[in-house]
Image (cartoon, grey):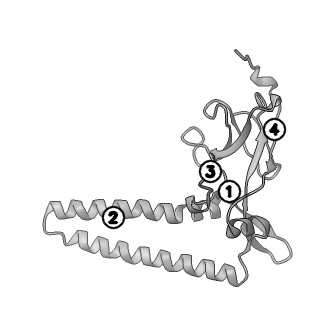
Amino acid sequence: MLRVNWRNVPEISYRQADITGNRLIRWLSDRGLYLGGLAGKIYLGVSFALFLGCLLFFWILLMAISRAPTSLVFLQIGISGGVILAVGYLVFGWQVRLVTNRVTRAPVLLQPLTVRYDDYLLELRPDEETERNSLYMVRYVADCPICGDKGQDTVHIESGRREFFQRLVGRCSRSPSELVVSLDLVTQRGGVL
């Protein structure tokens, strides 16, 4: 049994890992998507059109609920709206988190399907020359401060779950529930939580 003095565990240093995948994913990792150019305008235009379409659909849904003849129809429309709201959150939720926190986990469609961890992140980086943001896909990993000294395990970025709600944290691949490490993207360092 390994005994650990948690006060003497050193900070870890995150490093960027290689991103594999199709051309779009590698392009987002290498060059980024400049949000001030034509590609950024197309991205924002499509996102805004989808958002307006969802608003229109929810307005139609609310009108249908207000005119439901029976409680069973009211319940059916309400459940359908809840399911559509959940799907809408899956489509637009990562964009809200990206604007709020400047970093978020990449959507499921951009994550690799053949790898055990879905630890690709989307990060907004400021471009000081143009005073605009660019969107990059990144992946951070680190050596575990406890079991990584032996070269056994790596810390991957995952959700904070309920313990660290709406935060990205590092979790050891050997014991992801117990070995949780903070993540500071500015300094690329972290400490055991």
Say which amino acid is labelled 1: Leu
Quadrant location of the N terminus in the rendered image: top right
Residue 94, by quadrant, is: bottom right
Closer to the N terminus: mark 1 or mark 4? 4
Picture coordinates of residue 152 (x, y %)? 76, 32
Closer to the N terminus: mark 4 or mark 2? 4
Q: Secondary structure at mark 1?
A: strand
Say which amino acid is labelled 4: Ile
> Extreme front residue here?
114
Mark 4: few/some/many CA within 10 Å (<14, 14-19, 20+):
many
Quadrant location of the C terminus in the rendered image: top right
Say which amino acid is labelled 3: Asp
Give the residue pinned by disc 2: 81
Left or right for 12, reference 107: right
For discs 3 and 4, the disc positioned in front in the rendered view: 3
Mark 3: few/some/many CA within 10 Å (<14, 14-19, 20+):
some
Pointers 1 and 4 in contact (CB under 8 A)?
no
Closer to the N terminus: mark 3 or mark 2? 2
For discs 2 and 1, the disc positioned in front in the rendered view: 1
Q: Gap in Å between the C-alphas at discs 2 and 1?
A: 30 Å
Q: Which mark is residue 121?
A: 1
Residue 76, by quadrant, is: bottom left
Q: Gap in Å between the C-alphas at discs 3 and 4?
A: 21 Å
Say which amino acid is labelled 2: Gly
Instruction: Say above or below: 21 vs 6.
Output: below
Q: Image point 73% across, 82% down: which residue? A: 37
Picture coordinates of residue 43 (x, y %)? 62, 77
